Amino acid sequence: MLFDITIFILLIKIVCYFQLPPNSNYVRVAVCSALSDLFTRLSLFSNLREDGITFVAKLMPPIMELLNENESVDVLEGDLTLLTTILKSFPLSYVLYDKVERALVGLLVSRIYAEDLLKKIANCLAVLPMARVDENSQSLMMQKIILEINILLNDYFQGLEGEIERFSVVDLLSLGRDTPSQLGIVFLLSKITKEPTSKFVLYVIPTIMILMQCCGMMLTNSYPVQESVPLSALVALVRRVLSLNHSFHISLTGFTASTTFDEDFLRMRLPALHSGCMDLLIAVIEGVRSQFKAHADTVAQMLIEYSKRGLLTHLKIKWYSVMKSLLSIMGDGIVLLLAEELMNNASADLNGGSTHTESSSRHTESSIHLSVKIAALEALKTLLTAGKSLKSQFWRLDMDHFLITIAKNAFNMGWSDDFKLAALDTLYASLDTLELRSHRPPHFGELLDLFRTGQQEIGTKTADFCDDKLMFLQRFISLGLFPFD
């Protein structure tokens, strides 16, 4: 009881500092930090939960005032941290819940903040359903976000897609239930700017991207109640965005007379939108895991089609990341479906371009190409691991030959340490997925020579890796467990 009273007195004293004038912002930031720590500690004691709820009710008015104040970025950041802490542990009334939702949506749409702060706002909106603690809050918020993104796509991508893509998302979203209410983002955008081109250039695509980030955060956050995720609508949304091609030919007849369209800007920004969409797809796959099985084949085919476009470098890296998530979670069936396409893409990326040490004028370009090659090797490693039980498949022999060739070239041509490490790591994964006790792997003698060569590059990550793996292999051989021909 004494502990409860002490906390209450401390809380009242701290809250008084919220009333300080704006020139005391550094004190407000400190107060937000102290309160965040206090509520984190309160959440650890189940017997203090009711007290915590009472304290939250007293704190919410000044918290909301700071959210709506928009005068100091530092204060807003501290206030968001405090609010996020509260939302994760303590429920809100329906009235407060709606007020917080409106305030956060307004901050997201304002677009006056840096990207890092926008992500904090998006994260706060993503954890808001935790404060309702029921079976529908997370799913409902996700549906609202999907609906807003779909409306924005309807408004600004007419003429670039078919009617099926436009309407399939909302059809799947409302299947068997009422369409959820809107967050009001489209309405707020229309109030902030009234000139169509300005709204499109400055607001629409960035708003779609931050909403997708928010949705991804919801999928990867741990919620206290297991909820259903609107998977069909999410997959349809991803497919819709990725179907928009940066090499499109625009027919202006598809646009309303009031819309001014900047084709060059869309070409420039569309890759960023695709990148954000693939981040969302990764969050979907990793967030729902086994529940994604019913959609795995559809997404696999979508990725195969997408890879045939001649992707920009950063999109190719994201493509490999999505493939890794899909392969590692979905297993054998997807391995059989994606193996050939992944190997074809990896072969093209690993055999093209340059990965050796470049002059300073080409250093940035070389680093980008190197990132694609390493991403390709990491995806091949995931393919090998996921398809471990499929070692008799035809692609395994081709894979082993391909990987030993890439690893040999890495040393013969003096490529970077990071690339050598990635090549040897993938090559070792190919060896590790075979049953060494039953037969001799192909190219094993060359593999040992490569690892011994790598061991000589003292002071590098490659040398440390080779030391570790050779120790295991030599012990395996010395025990007579390896079947030499």
Image (spheres, rainbow, N blue to C red):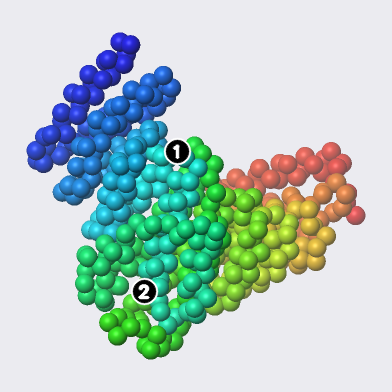
Dividing the picture into quarters, in which one does residue 28 lie? Answer: top left
Q: Amino acid at mark 2?
A: Asp
475 shown above or below 204: above
Find residue 91 and report its horizontal and vertical position in percent: 38, 35
Q: Given the current orientation, which residue lies at the most extreme top position?
A: 2
Q: Nearer the viewer, residue 318 or 198?
A: 198
Residue 238 image position (x, y, % from top left): 51, 65
Residue at 52% x, 76% y is 164
- Which element carries disc 2, helix, strand or loop? helix
Q: Which residue is mark 2?
A: 155
User: Horizontal placement of 297 versus 278: left or right?
Assistant: right
Q: Which residue is mark 1?
A: 133
* Res 357 visible: no
Q: CA distance from mark 1 to mark 2?
A: 34 Å
Determine whether 390 is above or below 90 in the image.
below
Crowd around label 2: few <14 · some 14–19 · many ≥20 (10 Å): some
- Residue 99 tag number: none
Whether residue 118 is visible, yes or no, is: yes
